[in-house]
Amino acid sequence: MVQQISDAELEIMKIVWGNPEDVTLFPYIMDGLAARDKPCQKNTLIVLLSRLINKGFLSAKKIGRRNEYTTLVSEAEYQTAQTKNFLDKIYEGSAKGLVSNLIMGDLLTDGEYEDLKKLLEKGKEKQ
């Protein structure tokens, strides 16, 4: 089961997930946070990275004086787990309740509505 992570930890993971390289280095994360207007002190980032390692989101490999960070949980896995958690918590597991709320609450653009219709039809064809 994928654990919950804090907003600050999620910002770090978004940077790591967005890195086209297989491994992510500390300066890349620092620069990524600064670019997102979320600058972070070096020691704070070290603590947050340690938490992500302990929660099973990242692994770290020491190469000389630097750590190379590798993702253990993909962005898709995290999104799926969080969506399921949200559905269970807010809609008692009902995807229909969520979709109904999105439509009735006028929370979808016309394009998103059409895309959702196509996805539902595609899913129906698979059954």
Image: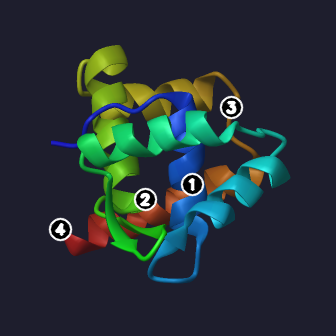
Q: Nearer the viewer, mark 3 or mark 2?
A: 2
Name the N-terminal-most of marks 3 and 1: 1
Residue positioned 26% across, 36% down in the render: 3
The residue beneath circle 1 is 14
Q: Nearer the viewer, mark 3 or mark 1?
A: 1
Q: Are marks 2 and 4 in contact (CB under 8 Å)?
A: no
Name the N-terminal-most of marks 1 and 4: 1
Disc number for residue 59: none
Looking at the image, residue 77 sits to the left or right of residue 99; the answer is left
Q: Are marks 3 and 1 in contact (CB under 8 Å)?
A: no
Residue positioned 60% across, 24% down in the render: 104
**Looking at this rendering, what residue extends furthest in the front direction?**
65
Name the N-terminal-most of marks 4 and 3: 3
Which part of the image, by quadrant, shows the C terminus?
bottom left
Mark 1, secondary structure of its residue: helix
Disc number for residue 75: 2
Q: Are marks 1 and 2 in contact (CB under 8 Å)?
A: yes
- Judging depth in this view, the residue of 91 and 56 nearest the camera is 56
Q: Amino acid at mark 1?
A: Lys
Q: Nearer the viewer, mark 4 or mark 3?
A: 3
Q: Amino acid at mark 2?
A: Glu
Name the N-terminal-most of marks 3 and 2: 2
- The location of residue 47, given as percent across then percent down, is 46, 35
Q: Amino acid at mark 3?
A: Leu
Looking at the image, residue 114 sits to the left or right of residue 88; the answer is right
Kindly report the distance in space between the C-alpha atoms of the residues bearing marks 3 and 1. Answer: 24 Å
Name the N-terminal-most of marks 2 and 4: 2
The residue beneath circle 3 is 107
Name the N-terminal-most of marks 1 and 2: 1
Kindly report the distance in space between the C-alpha atoms of the residues bearing marks 4 and 3. Answer: 28 Å
Kindly report the distance in space between the C-alpha atoms of the residues bearing marks 1 and 4. Answer: 34 Å
Mark 3, secondary structure of its residue: loop
